[in-house]
Image (spheres, rainbow, N blue to C red):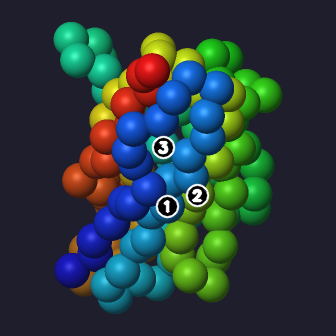
Amino acid sequence: QVQLVESGGGLVQPGGSLRLSCTSSGRIFSIYTMGWYRQAPGKQRELVAKITGGGSTTYTDSVKGRFTISRDNAKNTVYLEMSSLKPEDTAAYYCNADILSYSRGRSDYWGQGTQVTVSS
């Protein structure tokens, strides 16, 4: 069974930095696009950033220049480096991955979410 486990969330002051990690485990044959989404209270879940298997990246406009997504294919892990954090970045952050597994074929998977709170 494929699982995505996130870590790295927490409370940070405005202007601060955090690094999120998400590791995929299970009987994985290949991982395609990996991404980070976020959902603030009362709002819809939105894409923050994504990275393809080839390393191409996409960012939502509000985080460009502040967040960096990367991946370590040997570790089945995707990272989100967040800097110059703002209160409006406060949300639950969710990892997403497009995975080809031995048991389910190609499917979309989500992590359980990690809370990021930006407040003084």
Residue 93's x, y, as percent?
A: 38, 40
Q: State how many labels appear.
A: 3
Query: Circle 3 is placed at which residue position?
Result: 36
Which residue lies at the image location 64% right of the left edge and 48% below the top edge? Answer: 81
Residue closest to the eye, 50 or 12: 12
Residue 97 showing in the rendered view: no
- Pick the quarter of the image with the N terminus: bottom left
Relative to residue 8, is residue 102 drawn left or right?
Answer: left
SS at circle 1: strand
Q: Residue 63 carries which label?
A: none
Q: Distance between the residues labelled 3 and 1?
A: 10 Å
Residue closest to the eye, 99 or 21: 21
Relative to residue 50, is residue 64 drawn left or right?
Answer: right
Relative to residue 105, is residue 57 drawn left or right?
Answer: right
Three-letter code, disc 3: Trp
Mark with earlier residue (2, 1): 1
Tag 2–tag 1 contact (CB < 8 Å) = yes
Mark with earlier residue (3, 2): 3
Query: Circle 2 is placed at which residue position?
Result: 79
The label nearer to you, 3 versus 2, is 2
Which residue lies at the image location 36% right of the left edge and 80% below the top edge? Answer: 25
Residue 43 showing in the rendered view: yes
Residue 87's x, y, as percent?
A: 47, 17
Residue 33's place in the image compared with 86, above or below, is below
Q: Distance between the residues labelled 2 and 1?
A: 5 Å
Query: Circle 1 is placed at which residue position?
Result: 21
Residue 38's place in the image compared with 7, above or below, is above
